[in-house]
Structure formats: structure tokens, C-alpha cells
Amino acid sequence: MLALHHRKPDPVDADTLFPAASNTKAMTTLLLAELVDERKLQWDEPVTEVYPDFRLGDADTTRQVLVKHLVCACTGLPRQDFEWLFNFGTATPASSLASLGTMQPTSRFGEVFQYSNLMAAAAGYIAASVARPKQELGAAYDEVMRSKAFEPLGMTHTTFDFSAAMSGNFASPHGSDVDGKTTPARMDMNYSVVPVRPAGGMWTSARDLSKYIQMELAVGWLPDGKQLVSKESLLERHKGHVQTGEDTTYGMGLVVSTQYGSASELPPEPKEIALDAATLGDYVGKYRFDFGAVFDVALKSDHLEAQLTGQATFPIFASAKDKFFYKVVDAQLDFARNAVGEVVAVVLHQNGRDMRAPA
């Protein structure tokens, strides 16, 4: 792949910024989940109680819409993208929200999948109004996403600022010319998402987005052992609201496939206990697997951290003496002792395998 930098083709790398389009919706619903944890929102709360100015073109549908329905594509509201695509030059976040009041549902609530970018935008702006009630909706959304999502996740290059994104390592739009050859395309239409950016205005890179995906896989935990969002609030976004295929539903800004199981089938996390520093010190050392990797365990203040060759360092947590677990991945550790009580090996339990590494 090539990215266009000042009209010079350069290779795409892990930090090249791309418009994330509708992947932004998952980040917006992550914000909703965090606010639910903070008790500033409730999933089953009517949106009109959170944001009294919220209006759709149908009063009955307006009353039915709960916070969890804002990005569910299940309200019966049609897509109607032309309203914002043709008027983005003068549109604002507030006017985009107000335009929902002109739109009538074309199906019954929960009857059929109907994608609505304006409803997704409303989710982000209403969340922002709760978190930053004194700020303009767009500025509030940008700031709360930076402070509650991008910064904690380490997404250091991710932004909603088009000028900032396009000042460095970014990919320009491309298309086919009349001869079928790939050529740079105009950027103009991409600016249409700015007034509705919670639905699709994020610029991000492969490196940054992988950090968000890692958090999803770790059901809310960050690599440093801190919890960004509760498992319950995170997985609420995965619950299907409307069927889109044989094994797929649409959750909150997420297409959810159950072909190979679901996150709700994850085993329960062990209960964490505290061990004294002397006991923790027993486990410090390097353990060598027969496939060549070294498992390095170190004491950091009042907890242990472990690193496998070529991987990042993560905290590990005690569930009992000699038994530890990860929060960022489904993996457990058993430390083995000899007859005099010295720790002589560790066994890593992951993906159905038990791998022993002597000290």
C-alpha cells in the first residue's frame, strides 16, 4: 500500500493515519460504557431524560429511545444520509442533532436493521453533553474522547482534527480514473463527516487501533493492569439489538458474529488476593520454555510483572499462593516448588495448553 504525503508516494507504516469511518462508532459507544460505569448514564434510561432537546420526527418513537438504542440501528429510523451530506458546509453538531426531528421511522422499533449515522452522532454528542455540560457539543466530544478513550488507551496519534491528521503521515483518498487506473481522489466529501464525527470522523493508525482492539479482547483491562471500563458495561455493547444475518446481529456500533461463540462465554475471572512482599519475591526470576522463550518475572513495588520474550510487560495477579492470572488475556500461571520450598518452575496455562518453564 502507498500513502500520499505532499503528493509523494511513501510506504504505509504502522503509524500512517487513515480515516476510520464507522469504526468510530465503537469508540463512541466505549465512551457511553465508561459514563455508565461512572453512573452519569444508564443504558435503560430514556434519552429525553438525559438530553431533553432530543427529538425524532415521531413522538412515540422518541419516547421509546433509550440510551442503548442510540447506536443500535434498531429504532426504525432510516439512513437519510443526504440531509447531512448535502448540507455539511453550514452544519454544526447542534444542527445535526436538530435535524433528527424532521425524520420519520419507516419500520417498527426493532423490526429491521436500519443504519443511522445521525443517531450515532447523537450518541456521541449527548454523552459529551453529560461529561462536559458547559462546552459546545463538538468541542466537548473531542475533549472527552481524548481524555477518556484515546489517552488511556495510548492512542497517541488518533484525532478528529483533519488539519492535524493531514499535516504528517497520512493516507490520501484514491479512486479509479476513466481508464481504470488508481489515482488520488479529492478530499472534499470527507469533510462532510465533521459535523457528525461521532459516527465516523476519527483518524487513526494500525498501531493505535490495535491498542483499542487489545482492550476489547482483554474485556476492559489495559496492559498496565488498570481497568478502563467494566466487563459488564463493555459487553453490553456486544448484545444484539437487531438481526443482520444468520449468525450476526448489530449491537451498539458493532457487528457481532456468534458463529464461533461470544464474549459472554468467557470463564469468570479469578478473585484477586494480596500476598506479602517476601512471598512475591519467591517468584522473581527468569524461566525458560523449551521453545526458546524466556519468561521474566520482576517485582514492581507491591505487585509482580511478567514478560515473555518479544512481548510487552504485563502485571500478573495472585488468586492463591503460587497461583497467578493475567487480566489482559485468558491465561493463568502455577509456580512449582521443590521439597525445601524453593520456586523451581512456572506452568503457563493458555489456549488449552500447559507449558512448563524451569527456573
Image: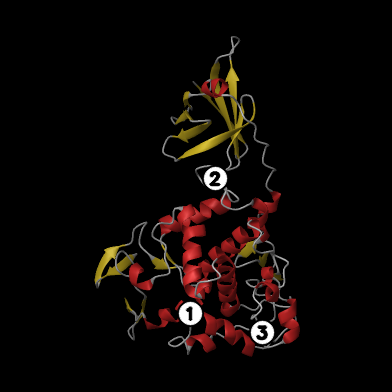
Which numbered marker is on residue 17?
Answer: none
216 sits left or right of 177 in the view: right
Whole-percent x, y for residue 77 in the image: 66, 82
Contact (CB < 8 A) between labels 2 and 3?
Answer: no
Give me the C-alpha separation between circle 1 and circle 3: 18 Å
Q: Quadrant of residue 252?
A: bottom right
- Residue 316 versus residue 216 in the image, above or below: above
Question: What secondary structure is marked by label 2?
Answer: loop
Q: What residue sits right under mark 1 in the picture? A: 195
Task: Give the mark nearest the N terminus, 2 or 1.
Answer: 1
Q: Residue at x 53, y 20 (%)?
A: 282
Whole-percent x, y for residue 157 in the image: 38, 60
Q: What residue sits right under mark 2 in the picture? A: 226
Give me the C-alpha separation between circle 2 and circle 1: 33 Å
31 sits left or right of 312 in the view: right
Task: Give the mark nearest the N terminus, 2 or 3.
Answer: 3
Q: Residue at x 57, y 51 (%)?
A: 217
Question: What secondary structure is marked by label 1?
Answer: helix
Q: Quadrant of residue 243?
A: bottom right
- Residue 356 versus residue 266 in the image, above or below: above
Local crowd at mark 1 within 10 Å, few (<14), some, or many (≥20)?
many
**Which of 271 and 145 lies nearest the eye of the viewer?**
145
Total marks placed: 3
Q: Is residue 245 visible?
A: no
Which numbered marker is on residue 56?
Answer: 3
